[in-house]
Image (cartoon, helix red, strand yellow):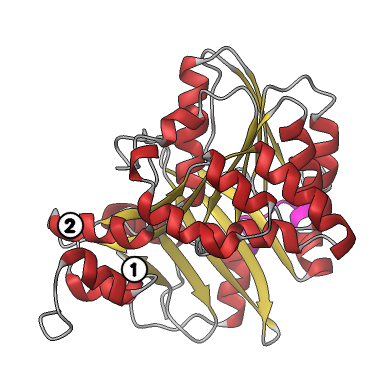
């Protein structure tokens, strides 16, 4: 049997425009192309082949971490060709790995078809901006575009904390320092505490995973820093609740006040396959109007969705209204919109179609 060639796998992934590559024992290498899994060949990988492919990409320290912790996140670059965000892991006493392609070029907000109101967030001197959505929804790409917008237009000190570093930023108008968890720092929380002593104007938190990280991020936003972070939530009201609910009950009232005062916006997104064979981000956008801030402060987040539906004059949009726009523009089909809608009946109402017609 022909031994798998990582260089050839990379060439195929790049040429096809795939977003991910998966290595798993007992199956051939698989790539994700426009949301679907496509096998690369017919020969299943053996345990030894998979181990050789993965270990061939790791440093000695990374190998030890994988053996000790049984999984590891790291970035891997093929110079001049592509960068990957990689998660290697053990499964059924063998190794597996998932490679996410990280584009070498940081695309602009316009190129990503993101709502124009997002640019307003990059001009803020302080506060908290949250970009949320499921894994693989393009959060990192959106954050990279926002950070690059600041880097291109403002003279700031930007500190990012990521696991791992995905997009490589170079100094433009801003000074930008990127720190990787596991390589440059031990944890998000430790890096955030340190960042506050590094004279930052803007802080990017790759993932707000725990109470301590969220607490420090809220404090940083409250004390004069512009903080960008991510959460794995599926809509804006859930995002507000997630931030608050991670704290013990006796702290939640104070956290609601901090969040209400410091929030600059929430963008919840998902990636959709288009009719042309590419993918596009569908975004729900919450802007912190006085009414929204009051709802957060008073613990009435269940009413936030009505603000999304009626707040277009303030730059807000619900996920369903965005899906309707993408359908009207001929970007995606109706069945997909209904499948991804927060409320299919609301989407039908926006489009003026009946259940039978849809």
* Label 1 secondary element: loop
- In the rendered image, which residue does mark 2 sit on? 331
Q: Nearer the viewer, mark 1 or mark 2?
A: 2
Ranked by sequence position, the earlier of labels 1 and 2 is 1
* Residue count near mark 1 (Cα–Cα under 10 Å), binned few <14, some 14–19, many ≥20: some
Up/down of 258 relative to 151, above or below:
below
User: How far is the residue under mark 1 from the one under mark 2?
Assistant: 16 Å
Q: Decide if residue 317 is in sight here.
A: no
Q: Is residue 60 magenta?
A: yes
Q: Quadrant of residue 275?
A: bottom left
Q: Quadrant of residue 251?
A: bottom right
Up/down of 213 relative to 158, above or below:
below
Q: Please indicate whether residue 50 sits to the left or right of residue 8 in the image.
A: right
- Taking the spot 27% from the left edge, 74% from the top edge, the residue there is 338
- Taking the spot 34% from the left edge, 41% from the top edge, the residue there is 115
* Label 2 secondary element: loop
- Identify the magenta region: 55-62
Up/down of 326 relative to 113, above or below:
below
* Between 159 and 212, the one nearer to me in the picture: 212
Quadrant the C terminus occupies: bottom left
- Taking the spot 74% from the left edge, 45% from the top edge, the residue there is 257
Q: Residue furthest right?
A: 250
The label shown at residue 209 is none
Q: Position of residue 11 (x, y in %)?
A: 35, 54
Q: Position of residue 100 (x, y in %)?
A: 49, 57
- In the rendered image, which residue does mark 1 sit on? 35
* Between 339 and 7, the one nearer to me in the picture: 339
* Residue count near mark 2 (Cα–Cα under 10 Å), binned few <14, some 14–19, many ≥20: some
Up/down of 316 relative to 109, above or below:
below
Q: Quadrant of residue 335?
A: bottom left
- Taking the spot 44% from the left edge, 59% from the top edge, the residue there is 306
């Amino acid at each position: 049997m022909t031994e798998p060639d990582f260089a050839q796998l990379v060439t195929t992934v790049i040429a096809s425009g795939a977003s991910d590559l998966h290595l798993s024992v007992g199956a051939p290498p698989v790539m994700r192309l426009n949301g679907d899994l496509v096998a690369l060949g017919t020969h299943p990988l053996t345990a030894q082949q998979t181990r050789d492919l993965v270990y061939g990409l790791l440093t000695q320290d990374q190998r030890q971490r994988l053996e000790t912790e049984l999984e590891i996140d790291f970035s891997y670059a093929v110079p001049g060709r592509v960068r990957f965000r990689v998660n290697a892991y053990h499964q059924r006493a063998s190794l597996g790995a998932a490679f996410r392609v990280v584009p070498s070029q940081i695309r602009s907000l316009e190129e990503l078809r993101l709502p124009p109101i997002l640019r307003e967030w990059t001009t803020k001197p302080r506060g908290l901006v949250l970009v949320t959505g499921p894994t693989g929804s393009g959060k990192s790409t959106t954050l990279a575009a926002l950070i690059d917008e600041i880097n291109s237009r403002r003279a700031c000190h930007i500190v990012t904390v990521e696991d791992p570093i995905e997009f490589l930023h170079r100094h433009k108008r801003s000074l930008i320092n990127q720190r990787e968890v596991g390589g440059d720092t031990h944890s998000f929380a430790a890096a955030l505490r340190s960042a506050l002593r590094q004279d930052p104007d803007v802080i990017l938190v790759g993932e707000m995973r725990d109470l301590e990280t969220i607490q420090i991020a809220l404090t940083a936003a409250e004390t004069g820093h512009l903080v960008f972070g991510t959460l794995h939530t599926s809509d804006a009201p859930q995002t507000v609740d997630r931030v608050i609910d991670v704290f013990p009950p006796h702290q939640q009232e104070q956290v609601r006040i901090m969040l209400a005062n410091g929030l600059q916006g929430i963008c919840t997104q998902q990636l959709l396959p288009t009719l042309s064979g590419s993918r596009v981000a569908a975004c729900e956008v919450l802007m912190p109007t006085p009414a929204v801030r009051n709802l957060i402060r008073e613990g009435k987040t269940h009413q936030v969705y009505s603000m999304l539906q009626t707040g277009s004059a303030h730059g807000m949009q619900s996920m369903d209204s965005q899906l309707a726009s993408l359908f009207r523009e001929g970007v995606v089909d109706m069945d997909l919109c209904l499948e991804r809608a927060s409320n299919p009946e609301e989407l039908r109402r926006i489009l003026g179609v009946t259940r039978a017609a849809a």
